């Protein structure tokens, strides 16, 4: 019997093609950067360069609170810039940007002299030069009126960057595209610009993109009658196999508004990361909107326009893909990058940031902090608030570390509620990590899937930063184990663990009633009965710490919550109530704390609703100093926005 070698070869070929296609879709980028100028606000500030960032290319957030990232007066001749176009260099060594040198707010639409060339190694610091066509090339461009919407593209054949733009002369109403190669330093043109493409009825706002060896030239084109009167305009396209042309012009308008009274301009095309889909976006400048249509072949576009979501009003701009590291650098300089582009997701990846006071974590909402000191490193473990602001929604737990209270490291999510097969997909609640015998045990509270009520589980890891996995495969504490003390289903939450000087570990937890029990050496089983702890006005969030001969049990009290505390000479009590430790936060109903000593200072870690977008269900971790009186009692916490100073090594 003959073996089907031919069939095998065909299958291998198809498999190879499929793998090649998958590889081609992997862009290596995690998000998008949008360079634009603003269409609203103070008129004198609109024509300045701004940046926005998106994870998906559709939902955008302005950086720097939508303030200019570079004052136009520093980079332009006129004091204004329009139509910024940003490009990643072909060898990935940096970035180029070009923009119209024009200040309509100051000088009107009469004329503008030229364009601005910019370059950067990092997206953060930019150098610039000015090209005034009338001054540089007076013989040909001395009579120029407009030099609009420059863009640049890498010519792989010439191994140079071609800059192209719209030109109108004072004695001619025709709008044509001219181009010239930039010099190696991207500061001037090599030669006088030459006519590149002359659309039949003129065109502005050109944007060229290469797909499968063919150049697609998108521009705002016009349709005129026999008398030269404009009867329609919209986004048109020309194509060519070479940047030098000839260009085959298409006379069909591609945008959805071509046959309406709505006008569009500023078209720009970019490819979605890890996708075969392209976005054709355009500026509906008279309507204050920015919309887009989709295509996979750059010829056929979706009929219905879609709108970007954004917290700014962009005018004619452009988009490039960016990496997570680039997004983090942008956020460090200007802030505003979506959390999803900052968060480390891959093993070994981390996000480093600086704290500038309370809350210490400002790029995401964090709550119910616990603290651990291990091998000279200060760790914070917290739940992530991700709700809509109307109830608690904490799908996972997070971990951060520092050695100086200023420079922090965030790690990939080490534990999620879905890591516990017995847990209901409802919400994760407060938790604490403790180390024993080289392993790290994370005690968490969540909802049980089959036993009504909250439950406490334990996960384990060989590293303080995880990943963690369920250490038992079942809950350690369930609601039916504590029904003799309360009739509620949510009293088994907020676990905290203390390992005493003799090595005995204790688990404390509770809501409305505080409980504690011994743990076995394996840290995953109880070693004796559950016992109640009598504390006045106990609500939740117990935490144990020790200083000298005194044990301290702090907890959240009443509602809205303040933090109170009690003291004892033994871990088993009796506990003597000492009063309020931390007052109401005022912007958050809950009050959850951790107390730990680090490098000679005592720290009180807690949460409030202090971020602009925060509140009772969108909380943020803070840190302030904890001080003791001479008799061992605690001084009341002074909550501050400044937070703690950098540790002096």
Image (tube, rainbow, N blue to C red):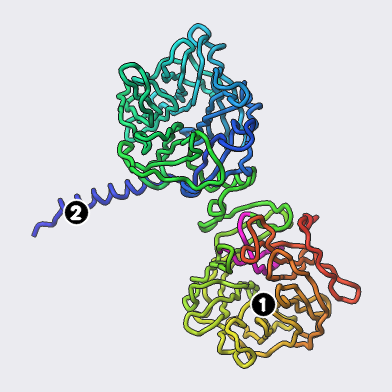
Q: As rendered, which of 346 and 196 lies closer to the eye?
A: 196
**Residue at 80%, 74% in the rendered image:** 580
Nearest to N terminus: mark 2 or mark 1: 2
Pick the front one: 120 or 204: 204
Q: Is residue 70 above or below residue 349?
A: above
Q: Residue at x 64, y 78 (%)?
A: 495
Residue projecting furthest to the top: 139
Q: Quadrant of residue 435?
A: bottom right
Nearer to us: label 2 or label 1: 1
| Residue in the foreground of this view, choosing between 287 and 576 | 287
Q: Which residue range is magenta in the image?
A: 363-387
Q: Is residue 527 left or right of residue 152?
A: right
Q: Which residue is mark 2?
A: 8
Dot 1 crowding, Cα within 10 Å, few <14, some 14–19, many 20+: many
Q: What's the magenta bit mostly, secondary-structure-wise?
A: strand
Q: Is residue 88 visible?
A: no
Res. 496 mark: 1
Name, please, the residue furthest toward the right. 630
Label 2 packing within 10 angstroms: few (<14), some (14-19), many (20+): few
Image spot of residue 135 (x, y percent): 57, 11
Quadrant containing the C terminus in the rendered view: bottom right
* 2 and 1 marks in contact (CB < 8 Å): no
């Amino acid at each position: 019997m003959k073996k089907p070698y031919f069939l095998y070869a065909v299958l291998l070929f198809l498999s190879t093609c499929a793998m090649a296609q998958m590889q081609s879709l992997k862009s290596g980028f995690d998000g998008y950067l949008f360079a634009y100028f603003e269409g609203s606000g103070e008129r004198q500030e609109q024509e300045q360069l701004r940046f926005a960032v998106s994870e998906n290319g559709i939902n955008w957030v302005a950086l720097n609170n939508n303030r200019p990232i570079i004052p136009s007066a520093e980079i332009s001749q006129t004091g204004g810039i329009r139509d910024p176009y940003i490009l990643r260099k072909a060898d990935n060594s940096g970035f180029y940007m070009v923009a119209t040198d024009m200040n309509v707010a100051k000088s009107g639409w009469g004329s503008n002299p030229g364009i601005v060339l910019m370059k950067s190694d990092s997206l953060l610091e930019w150098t610039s030069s000015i090209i005034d066509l009338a001054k540089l090339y007076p013989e040909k461009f001395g009579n120029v009126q407009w030099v609009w919407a420059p863009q640049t593209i890498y010519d792989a054949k010439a191994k140079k960057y071609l800059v192209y733009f719209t030109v109108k002369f004072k004695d001619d109403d025709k709008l044509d595209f001219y181009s010239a190669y930039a010099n190696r330093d991207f500061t001037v043109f090599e030669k006088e610009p030459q006519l590149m493409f002359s659309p039949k009825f003129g065109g502005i706002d050109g944007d060229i993109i290469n797909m499968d060896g063919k150049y697609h030239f998108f521009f705002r084109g016009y349709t005129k009658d026999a008398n030269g009167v404009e009867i329609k305009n919209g986004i048109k396209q020309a194509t060519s196999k070479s940047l030098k042309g000839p260009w085959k012009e298409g006379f069909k308008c591609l945008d959805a508004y071509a046959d309406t009274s709505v006008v569009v301009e500023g078209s720009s095309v970019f490819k979605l990361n890890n996708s075969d889909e392209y976005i054709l976006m355009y500026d509906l400048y008279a309507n204050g909107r920015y919309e887009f249509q989709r295509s996979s072949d750059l010829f056929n576009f979706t009929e219905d326009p879609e709108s970007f979501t954004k917290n700014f009003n962009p005018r004619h701009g452009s988009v490039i893909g960016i990496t997570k590291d680039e997004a983090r650098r942008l956020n460090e300089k200007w802030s505003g990058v979506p959390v999803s582009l900052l968060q480390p997701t891959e093993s070994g990846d981390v996000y480093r940031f600086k704290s500038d006071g309370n809350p210490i974590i400002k790029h995401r909402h964090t709550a119910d902090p616990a603290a651990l000191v291990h091998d000279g490193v200060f760790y914070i473990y917290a739940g992530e608030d991700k709700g809509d602001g109307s109830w608690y929604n904490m799908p996972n737990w997070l971990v951060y570390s520092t050695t100086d209270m200023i420079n922090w490291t965030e790690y990939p999510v080490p534990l999620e509620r879905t890591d516990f097969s017995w847990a209901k997909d409802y919400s994760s609640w407060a938790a604490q990590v403790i180390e024993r015998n080289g392993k790290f045990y994370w005690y968490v509270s969540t909802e049980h899937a089959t036993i009504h009520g909250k439950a406490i589980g334990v996960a384990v890891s060989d590293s303080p930063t995880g990943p963690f996995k369920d250490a038992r495969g079942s809950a350690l504490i369930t609601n039916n184990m504590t029904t003799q003390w309360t009739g509620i289903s949510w009293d088994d939450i907020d676990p905290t663990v203390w390992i005493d000087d003799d090595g005995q570990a204790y688990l404390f937890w509770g809501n409305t009633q505080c409980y504690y029990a011994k743990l076995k050496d394996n840290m995953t089983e109880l070693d004796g009965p559950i016992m109640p702890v009598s504390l006045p006005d106990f609500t939740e969030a117990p935490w144990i710490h020790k200083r000298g001969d005194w044990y301290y049990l702090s907890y959240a009290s009443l509602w809205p919550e303040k933090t109170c505390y009690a003291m004892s000479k033994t871990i088993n009590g009796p506990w003597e109530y000492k009063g309020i430790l931390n007052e109401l936060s005022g912007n958050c109903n809950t009050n959850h704390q951790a107390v730990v000593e680090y490098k000679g200072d005592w720290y009180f870690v807690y949460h409030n609703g202090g971020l602009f977008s925060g509140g009772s269900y969108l909380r943020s971790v803070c840190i302030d100093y904890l001080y003791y009186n001479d008799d061992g009692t605690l001084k009341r916490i002074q909550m501050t926005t400044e937070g703690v100073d950098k540790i002096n090594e």
